[in-house]
Structures are given as structure tokens and as C-alpha cells.
Amino acid sequence: MERSGADPAQFETVVPADGQLVIGITSLGDFGFTGAGFFTGTYSVKVDNFLPAGSISGRVVDAATQLPLAGVFVNLTHCTDATCVSASNVYSVYTDPLGQFTIAQGFTGAPLDPGWYTVSANPFFQRYLSAALPPFTVGSGENKVLPNLQLPPAPVIGSISGRIVDSVTHAPLSGLADPHAHVSLFGCASYGCVSLDGFADGTGRFRFDHDSSGLPILAVSGLSMMVVGDQYQQIMQQIPALTPGENLDLGDIPLISNPVRFTLLQGCTSVPASGGTCQYSIQVTNGSASSVEGTLWGTVNTFGLGSFVNQSTFEIGDQELSLAAATRTTRSSKSATFRLTIPPSVPPGAFICPTFWFGVDPVNPKLHTQGMMAFAGCVQKLTTGLVPATAAQTDALRKALREHEAKENAAAQAK
């Protein structure tokens, strides 16, 4: 379309099936086509017969096995010339269950122009690398069938291993018993993510050589590792980039102990329904390289009391305790006993959960805690007496307590 004295304006359109095409032309501002535009002049219309390309189709396969890959994102790009330096996206599709794709139009629904194109494939976390075909031409009316687009499998490593130890004694930390040393590895690349976790064995050692699906571990750069142990300080560290097939031994990974650690030696298991004394025996261990002297005490959280508030928190016995410094080979430990009287009025269904603390401040040690063991040996009152709570019940009680404390904090801040 060309207006006298102006550069031509070009556009493409599709003639309807009935062969009739109506084009309205007017000057700017005449949106109702009433002749009330701001400009005058003459116009001419030139119609060129345009035969578009037919379609572009192909198949995406595994470069190693030649098996088809379904669900791969395929993008078609139109290039201005064979170099494809200047290009624009035309259309995108996902491969079907047979790895096949066909593109016959652009994003606007217009047919494909003849000319230069290229096709790229992105597997999006399917353990394959992206790939693209070199530029190719498509002629008018041509249905272009491309050679297989082959995606190389993502690189994988052999294994990651190490041993978790105490930072002072260098003793191995078991994953099968206290302190239940645990390792997590995670990280992502364009071709997939790594998410591994597991407990060390009884000697503190761990080894990952496959993921949760049984597949080899992807060689992800920027892999992060988190190591935790009960009453040890959590550590996070980056894993160096691994080459394909590499077996990485991280050696000893030291965890820093809490200054004071606890071990439950005896819980409450023998109180009848008629009430009695519940006795807890704990071991207190110095986890630092310095001697400590302070106060040991316990608090008890109760739930399901049937009272107006239905729960309570109270303190039980203070005890003075001193522990020698830990050495390369030994840690100083002492045991302590706490007794709690359970009256018969505690209703069936109630839970009783002690938490043990150690503080060192000479004025008020309870404001300078150096260690704690939360919800140690929770018990539930049944009609026959007290029985140990299950791990799931204990976790639910911890969650309920956190939610209750959060509500109280929110209410206090709102005042």
C-alpha cells in the first residue's frame, strides 16, 4: 500500500477461503472511515501473490542411544541470512511421545515465510544438554523434514564421599545413633538438579554414587553441601566443580559441638495410672576445648491437661555442674537425675515433655544458655499409665508449641 509522496507500507495477510478480501484505507484519525481524517492525498494498492513455506518438522533423539525424547522444548528461529546473526523467534512447541515436532505457522498464526531458519532444543532439566541444528533454507510450498536433532546426555560424576567427625576429638560422628549425623547435597544446572540426602554410617562415613531414582549424579557446578548433627552446629559449604566421572573424597568434615551436649540415659516409663514419680537420667558432656561451670535445670511442657488453658510450662530442679575441657581424645561428661511427680488427676491423653538446659552466667545462668535438649523422652498418659510418645507425636507437639509461641509473640507485638 502506498500513499502519494510517502514511503510504501507493507503487510502480509491471508485471503479467506471464499477468495474475498476487503481492505479499508483512510488517513490518520478517521477511525470510523467517514472521511474525517487529518490528511488528504491519493492511495494505491499493489497486491503481490505470496506463496508461503509449508511446514518444518523433525525429531529430537538421545545422541547416545538414538531413542526419541518426548517433552523437549523446540524453538524455531527465522534468520535474515545464512549466518543467522540477525534472527527472530517464530514459534515454539514440545516434542510428542515419539520425539517428533511439526511447525507450520508463527506465533500470530501467519504461515511461514520462505527463507533461512534454525531449530534449537532445550530439554529443561531432563538430564540432557541443549543443542541446535545449523541454519537451513525452506522454499515456497516446501514441507521441510530435518535430520534428527541429537541431544547429548548431561555429564555425570562417579561419587561424592567423606567422613563426619567431631572438630575437637576428631572422633567419627555416627548417623545410626546419637548424634545422627546427616548430609544433604543440592544444586541445579540447565540440564537438571541434584538433591541428595542421607545419614552417615556408624563410622561417620557417607558416600553418594546415585540419586534417589538410581541414576548417576549429574555433574552440577556450584553444588552445596549441608551437614548436621544433633547438638552440633550445622555447616554449609560449596563443593568444587566436578569433572565427568570424577570420584570426590571430601575427607574429614569437622562439626563443632554445642558447648554443652545432652544424652538421655533413662526416660519415664514406669508410672501407673494412679500417679507416682517420673525419673529422668541424662548425661551432660562438655563439647568445647575449655572447661565450663554452670547450672543445669529442666523445664516441662504439658499438653492436653483438660484445664482452661489446656497446657502448661514449669521448671524442675537446679543443679550446679562443672565439666573439664575436652581433649583430642576425650570429653568430660557427668550424669544428672531429675524427678517429676505425676498426680493421678492428669487425664488420659495428656502429654508430658521435658527439656534440659545448661547455662554459665554467674549472675543468671538461665539468660546465658550453652546447651539444650528439647522434648527429651516425651510420655503420654493412658488409662493404664504413662507410655513413651512416638516420634511422630513428639514432632507434632514441638510444632504445636512453636505455633502457640508465635501467636503469643504476635499478640504481644500488637499491643
Image: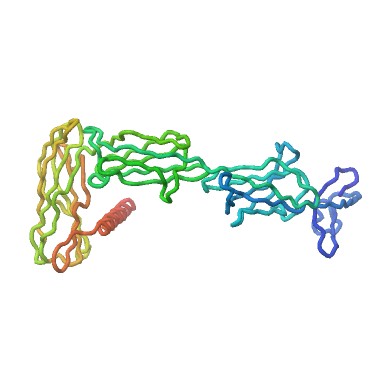
Q: In the picture, residue 300 is in which quadrant? A: bottom left
**So how many labels did they put on this image?**
0
Which residue lies most toward the bottom here? 383
Q: Is residue 154 left or right of residue 148?
A: left
Query: 288 or 313, which lies in front?
Result: 288
In the displayed structure, 71 sits above or below 249; it is below
Q: In the picture, residue 267 is in which quadrant? A: bottom left
Residue 126 image offset from top left, x and y in percent: 52, 48
Q: In the picture, residue 136 is in which quadrant? A: top right
Q: Is residue 256 left or right of residue 298?
A: right
Query: 220 or 28, which lies in front?
Result: 220
Residue 88 image offset from top left, x and y in percent: 70, 44
Which residue lies most toward the front here? 65
Residue 268 image offset from top left, x and y in percent: 13, 56
Residue 99 image offset from top left, x and y in percent: 61, 53
The structure residue drawn at horizontal position 26% and vertical position 57%, both measured from the top left corner, is 397
Colour scheme employed for the rendering of this structure: rainbow
In the displayed structure, 378 sits above or below 189; it is below
